[in-house]
Image: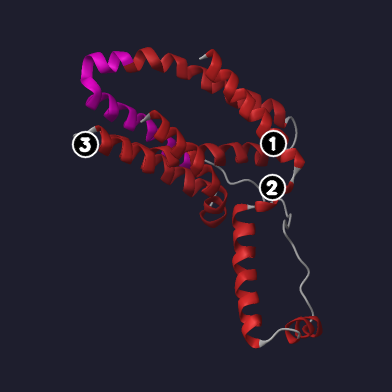
Amino acid sequence: MVAFVDAGVEVSGIIATPLMERFGARTVVTVSGLVAGISMATASLLPNLYGITFILTIFTGPAFGISTVITKHLIGSYFSKSITTAYGLSTLGSSFTFFAVPLIQLFLDIYGWRGTWLLLGGLFLNLAVVGALMKPPAASGRRDGYEAALTDEEQYTREDKLTPSNRFLSSFFIRIFSFTRDTFQLGLFSSILFWLVVLIYSLEFIMLSIHG
C-alpha cells in the first residue's frame, strides 16, 4: 500500500505545472488540501485494505504530490536572491515529521486505526488553509516558448507545398505535439543540467533507502 501511495505522489508531479498555469497556485494547493483531507477521512470508513489503497493512491497521494511540487516552484518565484538558503530553510520542516511517528502510534493505541485516519485527515485539511493564504508571485514578464508569428506569405508558402489531406494531418499532429510539449515542458528532457539534477536527486533517495 505504501508503494502504491508513494507512486501516486511521485507521478502526480507531472501534472502540477499544467494545473498551476490553468487555475493558479493558490487554487490548486487549496483544492489539494481539501482532497487530501477528505480522502483520508473517507478511507477510515472503508471496510477493506483494497478500498483504502485505491483512495489513498488516486486522491491522497496525488493531492500531496501536486501541492509539494507547486510549493517548491513558489519558493523559486518568491526569492530571486538567496534562493538556496530559502530552499534549505524550507526543508527544515521535514525534520518535524520524525516527531509524528510516536504521535501516530499514540493515536493508534487510543483511537484505533479508523480514528487515526480521521485525525490525519483533519491534519491534512490544514494544507487547504495554507493554500488559501498563499500570495501569488509577481509576474516576471518572461515569455517562455515564444515563437515569432509567420507572415501571411510565409504561411501560404508552407501550406502550398502540401496536399489538402497532408496539410490537415500535418496541422493536426503539429498541434498535438505543440500542446504536449508546452503542457508537460518536454524540452527539459534534452537538457543536460536537468539530468544531472535527476541523478543527484535519485542518488539521495537511494542513500536514504539504504540507511533507512
> In the shown orientation, is residue 93 left or right of residue 73?
left
72 in the magenta segment: no
> In the shown orientation, is residue 17 left or right of residue 53?
right
Q: Quadrant of the N terminus?
A: top left
Mark 1 burial class by Cα count in 10 Å: few <14, some 14-19, many 20+: some
Q: What span is colored magenta in the figure?
A: 105-132
Label placed on residue 188:
2
Residue at position x 81%, y 85% in the image: 153
126 in the magenta segment: yes
Label placed on residue 46:
3
- In the foreground, 130 or 111: 111
Looking at the picture, which amino acid does disc 1 mark? Phe
Of the numbered discs 2 and 3, the one sitting upstream in the chain is: 3
Q: CA distance from mark 2 to mark 1?
A: 22 Å
- In the displayed structure, 154 sits above or below 129; it is below
Counting from the top left corner in percent of width and height, residue 40 is at 31, 35
Residue at position x 74%, y 54% in the image: 142
- Residue 69, located in which quarter of the rendered image? top right
- In the displayed structure, 59 sits above or below 183; it is above
- In the foreground, 47 or 165: 165
- Residue 127, located in which quarter of the rendered image? top left
Tell which tag, 1 or 3, sits nearer the viewer.
3
Q: Circle 1 sits in a helix, a strand or a loop, which is it? A: loop
For mark 1, what is the residue? 79
Looking at the picture, which amino acid does disc 3 mark? Leu
Counting from the top left corner in percent of width and height, residue 131 is at 48, 41
Mark 2 burial class by Cα count in 10 Å: few <14, some 14-19, many 20+: few
